[in-house]
């Protein structure tokens, strides 16, 4: 159910795509049906011939399977470079950026900056590979879903084994994390707005989670990926806004008393190794969104004359320029201001802890509000692949579009499941490093192997060597992070508490 819908319909009933999927008006069907003369068949052939010609010269976008027009990711093919920039920026920068100063506390200035720069260049290179792999042959198959590309390259069985869990974690797991961060931020905003003398009983953490999920589910009723471009723009603007506000305030307030930039001293070599691996994991997880690149590009028209990779790459370049302008100041400015006193939850928690009383409540409240807005909007784009999978099952079985009431039910069900996980399994945050190591190949390794399998460069050429080296290094890094986090869990233990969500700070 995670792969593309097969082109052959399961029933002999004919299927046609909605006319809205074409960039030039489709010929009206009623005059053709009205033709009862012997000329009807030649006219139909002529229309089909002209239509094929327009597809070849680049005026109409071809649909390999008409049923793609009924699924949320490919329902609209009217995307452009601006939409690509909005979606990539919304998925590429968010709350994970606020934790980067904690990685600096584990690695120190030099190694942290080197690792951050290498990771940024590496993930941008693999992002470029995915953009080119979306349609490796002009006019050929379009891989509009990451799982479709994975099963094509690795086979149906191994594609699901290698890529299904990581991609689902990057979608559903990120949505669960957004519920925790967004709901916790709502609680903080309530306490800021109410003030220290507030007599109202504040809602519990679980109640804030429910509020967040209700708002997110209402927003998720937008039908397809293209329709949430405006939502992604709002989310991206909010992310850039709160990242900038937080690091500027932190730097403007100066370094806290007793700041030190030496890596945090560990009690043993094991603890030190775990801290370093944790820092590397934070940096690696700061770059997310590769599981959505093919889906975003799938919303664009693509023809021989105007291939989709051109506007997509323009949007990606702009988005990741802004991502870099957010991540580096947050990481460097946050570590400069707080040093190794940075809390594990990152720079936002440090702002509350060290400057909660000497910074205007209005400023802190605005930054917290922007975090909430970003979490609500980012939820939409990360949930879209799951929505697509749910609806694909219905479309494949029934051979007709998913009705609106069933679509709404699917999305409410997904929100409820994520809410249950956030409330029932609050200790999953302690497994974030382990799950991050499992999902790391989606970003840093699999694209290299996919490019080798599809493009088939000559053995020993520069591209062959680069992709084999980066793919192997990515798999090795993933293995090290998985082993290191398992080692840490064995050494320190896993604090299991069901249905007791911790306070977000």
Image (spheres, grey):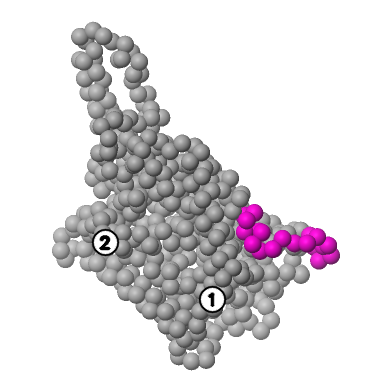
Taking the magenta stretch, the answer to whether it contains residue 88 is no
Residue at the image point whose x is 53% and y is 46% from the top: 220
Circle 2 residue: 158
Q: Quadrant of residue 18?
A: top left
How would you rate the neighbour count of disc 2 (Cα within 10 Å): few for under 14, some for 14-19, many for 20 or more? some
> Label 2's element?
helix
Between circles 1 and 2, the one closer to the viewer is: 1
Q: Camera-side residue: 210 or 43? A: 210
Say whether residue 253 is visible.
no
Q: Where is mark 1, residue-wise?
A: 496
With 237 as the anchor, is 386 left or right in this view? left
Whether 385 is drawn above or below 255: the answer is above
Query: Would you place residue 385 above or below residue 324 in this image?
Result: above
Q: Quadrant of residue 457?
A: bottom left
Q: Nearer the viewer, residue 191 or 10?
A: 10
Give the percent coordinates (x, y) of residue 205: 66, 64
- The kind of secondary structure element at disc 1 is loop
Magenta-colored span: 194-212
- Any part of residue 317 in sight: yes
The reply to whether the magenta stretch includes residue 202 is yes
Left or right of residue 457, residue 439 in this image: right
Where the C terminus falls, by quadrant? bottom right
Which mark is first along the chain, 2 or 1? 2
As drawn, the label of residue 142 is none
What residue is drawn where x is 52% and y is 58%?
418
Neighbourhood count class around disc 1 (C-alpha, 10 Å): few under 14, some 14–19, many 20 upward = few
In-front residue for pair 36/330? 36
In this view, 315 is above or below 258: above
Residue 196 place in picture, x, y as percent? 81, 66
């Amino acid at each position: 159910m995670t792969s593309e819908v097969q082109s052959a319909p399961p029933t002999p009933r004919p299927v046609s795509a909605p006319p809205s999927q074409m960039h030039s008006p489709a010929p009206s069907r009623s005059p053709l049906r009205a033709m009862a003369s012997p000329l009807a068949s030649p006219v139909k052939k002529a229309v089909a011939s002209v239509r094929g010609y327009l597809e070849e010269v680049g005026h109409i976008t071809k649909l390999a399977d008409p049923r793609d027009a009924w699924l949320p990711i490919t329902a609209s093919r009217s995307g452009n470079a601006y939409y690509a920039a909005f979606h990539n920026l919304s998925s590429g920068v968010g709350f994970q950026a606020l934790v980067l100063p904690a990685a600096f506390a584990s690695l120190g200035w030099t190694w942290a900056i080197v690792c951050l720069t290498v990771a940024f260049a590496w993930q941008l290179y693999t992002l470029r590979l995915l953009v080119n792999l979306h349609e490796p042959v002009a006019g050929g198959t379009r891989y509009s879903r990451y799982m479709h590309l994975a099963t094509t390259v690795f086979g149906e069985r191994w594609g699901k084994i290698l890529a299904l869990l990581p991609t689902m974690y990057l979608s559903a797991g990120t949505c669960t994390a957004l519920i925790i961060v967004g709901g916790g931020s709502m609680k903080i905003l309530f306490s800021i707005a109410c003030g220290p003398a507030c007599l109202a009983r504040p809602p519990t953490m679980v109640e804030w989670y429910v509020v967040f999920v209700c708002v997110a589910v209402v927003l998720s009723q937008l039908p397809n990926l293209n329709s949430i471009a405006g939502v992604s723009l709002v989310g991206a603007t909010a992310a850039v806004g709160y990242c900038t506000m937080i690091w500027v305030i932190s730097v403007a307030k100066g370094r806290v008393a007793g700041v030190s930039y030496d890596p945090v001293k560990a009690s043993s070599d094991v603890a030190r190794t775990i801290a370093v691996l944790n820092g590397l994991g934070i940096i690696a997880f700061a770059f997310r969104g590769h599981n959505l690149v093919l889906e975003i590009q799938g919303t664009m028209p693509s023809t021989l004359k105007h291939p989709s990779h051109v506007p997509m790459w323009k949007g990606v370049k702009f988005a990741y320029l802004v991502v870099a302008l957010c991540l580096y100041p947050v990481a460097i400015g946050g570590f400069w201001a707080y040093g190794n006193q940075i809390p594990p939850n990152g720079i936002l928690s440090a702002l509350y802890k060290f400057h909660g009383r000497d910074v205007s409540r209005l400023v802190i409240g605005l930054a917290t509000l922007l975090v909430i807005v970003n979490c609500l909007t980012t939820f939409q784009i990360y949930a879209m692949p799951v929505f697509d999978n749910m609806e694909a099952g219905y479309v494949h079985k029934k051979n007709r579009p998913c009705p609106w009431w069933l679509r709404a039910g699917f999305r409410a069900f997904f929100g409820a499941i994520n809410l249950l996980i956030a409330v029932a399994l609050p200790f999953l945050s302690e497994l974030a490093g382990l799950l991050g190591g499992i999902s790391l190949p989606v970003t840093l390794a699999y694209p290299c192997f996919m490019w080798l399998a599809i493009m088939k460069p000559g053995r020993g050429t520069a591209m062959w060597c680069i992709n084999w080296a980066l793919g192997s290094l990515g798999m090795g890094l993933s293995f090290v992070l998985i082993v290191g986090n398992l080692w840490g869990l064995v050494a320190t233990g896993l604090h299991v508490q069901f249905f007791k969500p911790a306070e977000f700070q």
